[in-house]
Amino acid sequence: AAGVIQSPRHLIKEKRETATLKCYPIPRHDTVYWYQQGPGQDPQFLISFYEKMQSDKGSIPDRFSAQQFSDYHSELNMSSLELGDSALYFCASSQRGQTNEQYFGPGTRLTVT
Amino acid sequence: AQSVAQPEDQVNVAEGNPLTVKCTYSVSGNPYLFWYVQYPNRGLQFLLKYITGDNLVKGSYGFEAEFNKSQTSFHLKKPSALVSDSALYFCAVRATGTYKYIFGTGTRLKVLA
């Protein structure tokens, strides 16, 4: 079965640079979620989109922005990167509905040096 | 505030023995509860969920979880542990009125041969 695809899988950036993470949801999933997982931490919700509109917002820094496109893929744009942004970034997708589980991608490991 | 607690950072169990990974929650309204497993450098994999109905929920890989409303708990269980069950387990609750997950801090399960 098709899964959530994230690219790139690994990314190394320097401080103050920008990064763009991409997420391709499971076909027919209309909702995309972004999470950040620091080393040894639980995933923290950043932001989500439903039908290309932002639906929930969590602890996403102002330096980050995201959007969902007409083909339902999503991009997380991160600017003015800081060392503390080094983390695993997960995208998840689901069909709309509070009872529906989210399916997670393999993650993008971002290292800021 | 809505939250999830996993009181044990690590659980050790001998192969073949039953295992329990604990989770308690605090939400307003009806809780939608989920368990995920994370293997090293991998995304989170959905195991099972409780939405309504039978308090004992069966999921993937022989796991099950028992919902206890009076104790606000949703403990993950398996009758006979396998070494391959060794991983990081996250309990999550869907926040009332939103679609995002709130995760517990995770419990590392180590099954000893």
Image (tube, coloured by chain):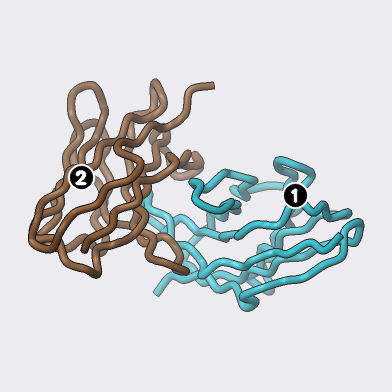
Chain colours: A brown, B cyan
Residue depicted at 61% across the width and 48% down the height: B49
Label annotation for residue B84: 1
Rendered location of residue B63, percent (x, y): 75, 49
Type of amino acid at the residue the image marks with label 2 = Leu
Q: Quadrant of residue B12?
A: bottom right
**In screen coordinates, is A70 left or right of A3?**
left
What is the C-alpha distance between the residues marked 1 and 2?
34 Å
Residue B14 placement, left or right of B56: right
The relative height of residue B3 versus residue A111 in the rendered view (above or below) is: below
Camera-nearest residue between B22 and B112? B112
The mark found on residue A113 in the picture is none
The answer to whether A68 is drawn above or below residue B68 in the figure is: above
Q: Does residue A20 lie above or below B27 as drawn?
A: above
The foreground one among A1 and B27 is A1
Camera-side mark, 1 or 2: 1
Q: Position of residue A70 (x, y in %)?
A: 18, 23
Give left or right: position of B112 versus B22: right
Would you name the residue on which mark 2 appears? A76
Rate crowding at label 2 as few (under 14), some (14 to 19) or many (20 or more) other CA atoms within 10 Å.
Answer: many
| Chain to which mark 1 belongs | B
